[in-house]
Amino acid sequence: MNELDFEKPIIELEKKIKELRSFISDKKIDLSSEAKRLEDKLGHLRKDIYTNLTPWQKVQIARHPKRPYTSDYIGACMTGFIEIHGDRSFADDKAIIGGFAHIDKQKIMVIGHQKGRDTKENIKRSFGCAHPEGYRKALRFMQMAEKFKLPIVIFIDTPGAYPGIGAEERGQAQAIALNLREMTGIATPIVATVIGEGGSGGALGIGIADKVCVLENAYYSVISPEGCAAILWKDSARAPNAASVLKLTGEDLIKLGIIDEIIPEPLGGAHHDPQRMAQTLKESIIKNLKELDKLNKDELLKLRYKKFRGMGITG
């Protein structure tokens, strides 16, 4: 079921309704009014819980194993996807996928973090945590998009960059830093959306964009709540407290000028209605690409640079 703690009252009520429906069917007794009352109660309960989520609860939804990943959105929002592989230097990092595709009639380059659905695939994809070759691979794709004058669509979904010794030996920090620098000068429109987890430099390494969007129950943060809690309070169990002070939800991020748009999700999260979520996301991407298409190269780069240089400035 993959149920979350705060969803247990919903699950229990759904179970009661199912049992009542089964009883009505077996016994041929008319209890439709009671079933309707419980279903109305369920609807109110869902709305009350899912519209009043705490930051930590949103983090839990962002990590839900049934949540749509990059490959799901590519399949649902785009057509004619042709995947490209490798960084032409070391390896093909499976935590980053990308290639050519069409969104409606617009040809694009799409890039994103990719998690796995089971243990075997998660190991293969490093749980969506990219190595240096993954960031170099992404940059190669972006430079290719610039060469062919294609807009870039990015999906961010990672706990952070891969933290292993091998990744550090191959220049993890340098690869991310290079991407930050080079993406400011990629002369083609870039739209990035945080679809799940937006963790630290691992997210920012492909996150320099003209339009940065976050799904309603996704998060974007300099560090994970558990990591923050371990540093501040020496206790990762205080992750819910850390999630509140990190200002990592869409509502906080838009107030701080970190993102441009919050994309609404179906009640309960994207995994409750992936098809509708994909359609909403597609509409947002198309709208943002049309807006950016009105800008010439100099305007595009000037506004992108100004956007990121202005973050953190108050008063």
Image: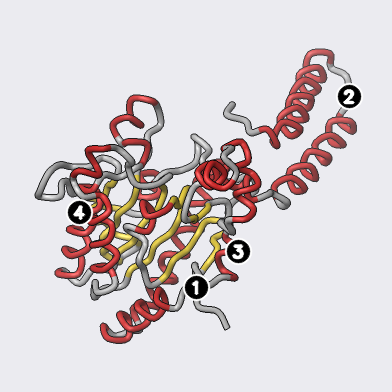
Question: Which residue is outermost to the left?
Answer: 88
Front tag of 2 and 3: 3
From the image, tell me which residue sits under label 1.
312
Q: Give the x, y percent position of residue 214.
A: 50, 59
| Residues packed near mark 3 inside 10 Å, few (<14), some (14 to 19) or many (20 plus) | some
Q: First in sequence, mark 4 or 3: give its number.
A: 4
Front tag of 2 and 1: 1
Q: First in sequence, mark 4 or 1: give its number.
A: 4
Secondary element under disc 2, as helix, strand or loop, is loop
Secondary element under disc 1, as helix, strand or loop, is loop
Question: Which residue is outermost to the top?
Answer: 27
Q: Amino acid at mark 3?
A: Asp
Quadrant where the image shows the C terminus = bottom right
From the image, tell me which residue sits under label 3.
252
**Above or below — where is 308 with respect to 282?**
below
Separation (CA) of disc 2 from disc 1: 62 Å
Front tag of 3 and 1: 1
The disc at residue 255 is none
Relative to residue 239, is residue 295 drawn left or right?
left
Q: First in sequence, mark 2 or 3: give its number.
A: 2
Q: Amino acid at mark 1?
A: Gly
| Residue at the spot 37% in from the left edge and 59% down from the top edge | 204
From the image, tell me which residue sits under label 2.
30
The residue lying toward the viewer, choosing from 195 and 108, is: 195
Q: Give the x, y percent position of residue 71.
A: 35, 44
Secondary element under disc 3, as helix, strand or loop, is helix
| For the residues bearing labels 2 and 4, Cβ distance under 8 angstroms | no
Q: Amino acid at mark 2?
A: Asp
Q: Give the x, y percent position of residue 157.
A: 41, 48
